[in-house]
Amino acid sequence: MNYIKQLEHSNNELAETIVAREDRVQELRAYLCGPKFAQDQSDGSRGDLVGVADILRWLAYIESPAK
């Protein structure tokens, strides 16, 4: 493979990775805006608290290679 084709291929892979990560970040935003985290829950408790383990799992998912 010549050098320019190799660069094009690398560029395309990088673009796909960027798009996949942007999609995953958008998924995390949707998750955080969902009913689970509504500020006022039906039982009167606060719903805007987030578990650290949940966010760490999301970050691991975002950072993992796209399939």
Image (cartoon, rainbow, N blue to C red):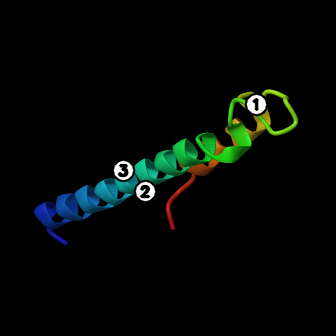
Q: Which mark is residue 52?
A: 1
Image position of 52 with respect to 62: above or below: above
Q: Position of residue 35 (x, y in %)?
A: 68, 46
> Between marks 1 and 2, how big is the CA–CA gap?
23 Å
Q: Position of residue 17 (x, y in %)?
A: 39, 55
Element type at mark 2: helix
| Mark with earlier residue (1, 2) | 2
Closer to viewer: mark 3 or mark 1: 1
Which of the pair 17/4 is nearer the observer? 17
* Tag 3 and tag 1, C-beta contact below 8 Å: no
Which of the pair 7/35 is nearer the observer? 35
Q: Residue at x 57, y 52 (%)?
A: 64
Q: Residue furthest bottom?
A: 1
- Residue type pointed to by label 2: Ala
* Image quadrant containing the N terminus: bottom left
Q: Does residue 63 appear in the picture of this structure?
A: no
Element type at mark 3: helix
Q: Say few, some or many: other residues with alpha carbon within 10 Å of mark 2 (under 14 / 14 to 19 / 20 or more).
A: some
> Between marks 3 and 1, how big is the CA–CA gap?
25 Å
- Residue type pointed to by label 1: Val
Locate residue 54: give its quadrant. Answer: top right
Image position of 60 with respect to 51: above or below: below
| Mark with earlier residue (3, 1) | 3
Q: Position of residue 10 (x, y in %)?
A: 27, 58
Q: Which residue is mark 3?
A: 18
Q: Which residue is mark 2?
A: 20
Q: Using residue 45 as the reference point, say whether residue 32 is left or right of it.
A: left
Q: Does residue 7 appear in the picture of this structure?
A: yes
Q: Say few, some or many: other residues with alpha carbon within 10 Å of mark 1 (under 14 / 14 to 19 / 20 or more).
A: few
